[in-house]
Amino acid sequence: MTHRIRTRFAPSPTGFLHVGGLRTALYSYLFAKNQGGDFVLRIEDTDQKRLVSGATEGLVSVLETVGLFCDEGFRLHEGICEQHGNHGPYIQSERLPLYQRYANELVDREMAYHCFCSAERLTEMREIQIAAKRAPRYDRHCLSLTPSEVEAKKAAGEVSVIRFRIPDDRDIEFTDLIRGTVKFHTRDMDDQVIIKSDGFPTYHLAVVVDDHRMEITHVIRGEEWLPSTPKHILIYEAFGWQLTAFGHLPLLLNPDKSKLSKRQGDVAVEDYLGKGYLKEALINFVALLGWNPGKGETQEIFTLAELREKFDLAKVNKAGAVFDIKKLDWMNAEYIKRMDIDSLFVRLKTGNFLEKELIWQAPDFMQTDIFLKRVLTIEQDRLAKLSEFGEQNPFFFTESIEYDIDLLRWKENTRALTREALEKARTILGALDEPTWGIHAELERVLLEAAGDKRGDFLWPLRVALSGAQRSPSPFDCAWVLGKDATLQRIDAAIRKCAISPDASS
């Protein structure tokens, strides 16, 4: 086997990519890259009943979207998955003769055997074992069949599977890259099926054959596969192959410490990307679900390049990692704040986050790139995810706004004083030329200078006139986004409100 580090991610095309799967892929990728090795993407489609059309393309698309490109395996080209590399094919359904050959070799060496037991017999057997409070396991009813008896049953049309014979009374011990020494005993293991009745291999045989043939040196996978590892070790031994190194990742947990599942929220990577979480933030967040850079390290924001440099399997925790959506929101907001406005706007457009009713129904000038980019500039520091764009400030996308006239008043000011402040703002802003309206800092300077020491008296009614809201961005922000015409129209409307409804003291 090669001395070059080679890892693999081997998902089944049965649906969307789970965030747990993304973490497995990410850790496998980071470990390989940190060691100067190769990351292989393989598709495991032995369970033909669970296959979902288009799932392979979806899996590869998501991995490439978040920046995890494989050195061998599958890549997307114009929406079509293409295989590349010297160890293919990289999909199990195209490797069936290979598995059959190895399974038959084990049968010939009496390390595996044909089993013709019906589903009904197996069910009855397990029910009896459970009633007797014994662990359910195959009773080796077919182990004693001679080769001639096997051939006779096949000739008669009887359907069989091939089972791997687990050695009796053996301890299987190995060193897990994350958990340290792990030990199993063969008394607790069943004679697993390695070739199903449809001729397809089970995971146990296929994964060992594929990892060996593809020269995989390190297998990083979820802890749910830990009980299967001794079975795989025995198959490696049966063929006399060099054993890969294994590392089993801790579970991902909900905040209540239950296993992360769709019943308690989104688990598909596509769901998070679709809600406006940036790919960089999602990768950063997932990387920290079980791994940390070490004691004394306070850095939490990592680029993919930094993760490749710093990642170390020895710093992966054994305990389950809590998927804290609040932490993801915070991290995503940090990435949004740090991105330049032009790049962030491209993400908005390409992610279809501008395709919402709020914007569709707005006047034409409010749907232009210039206007939308100004809104984004104002909202950038307040967004947790891109899907929130515009939702905190809907007044930016309507021609007229409704609000109670008393909201215009600053503290105990009369409506007359409020109207006076609005008229002053109207005069000052109306006199500015168009170039000045395009410079946020200049608008802010002019209005602050006009406000003087009594900022609340002057700026509060102006802000409400432009937003109609108790809380909103500053009047400089609102005026800059809305532009001269819309700003003056809203001020005029507010002045008319004050004129129509004068208070008794004015």
Image (tube, helix red, strand yellow):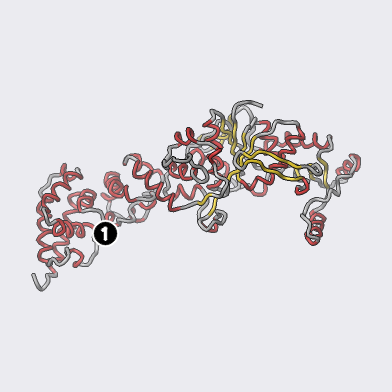
| Residue 169 vertical position relative to residue 417 in the rendered view, above or below | above
Q: Residue at x 38, y 50 (%)?
A: 384
- Report the number of numbered marks: 1
Q: Amino acid at mark 1?
A: Arg
Q: Which residue is mark 1?
A: 471
In the image, 312: left or right of 109?
left
Q: Is residue 341 left or right of residue 466?
A: right
Seen at 83% across and 43% down, the residue is: 114
Q: Residue furthest left?
A: 506
Q: Is residue 239 above or below residue 367?
A: above
Q: Residue at x 86, y 45 (%)?
A: 143
- Please name whichever residue, 370 or 64, is drawn nearer the observer in this view of the structure: 64
Q: Secondary structure at mark 1?
A: loop
Q: Quadrant of the N terminus?
A: top right
Circle 1 packing at 10 Å, graded few (<14), some (14-19), many (20+), is few
Q: Nearer the viewer, residue 181 or 429?
A: 181
From the viewer's perspective, is 435 left or right of 180? left
* Residue 421 place in picture, x, y as percent: 11, 59
Q: Is residue 301 left or right of residue 313?
A: left
Q: Is residue 333 visible?
A: yes
Coordinates of residue 120 in the picture (x, y in percent)? 80, 56
The outermost residue toward the front is 296
- Residue 111, given in percent of the width and then of the height, sits at 81, 38
| Nearest the eye: 175 or 348 | 175
Looking at the image, which is closer to me, 327 or 89? 327
Quadrant in which the C terminus appears: bottom left
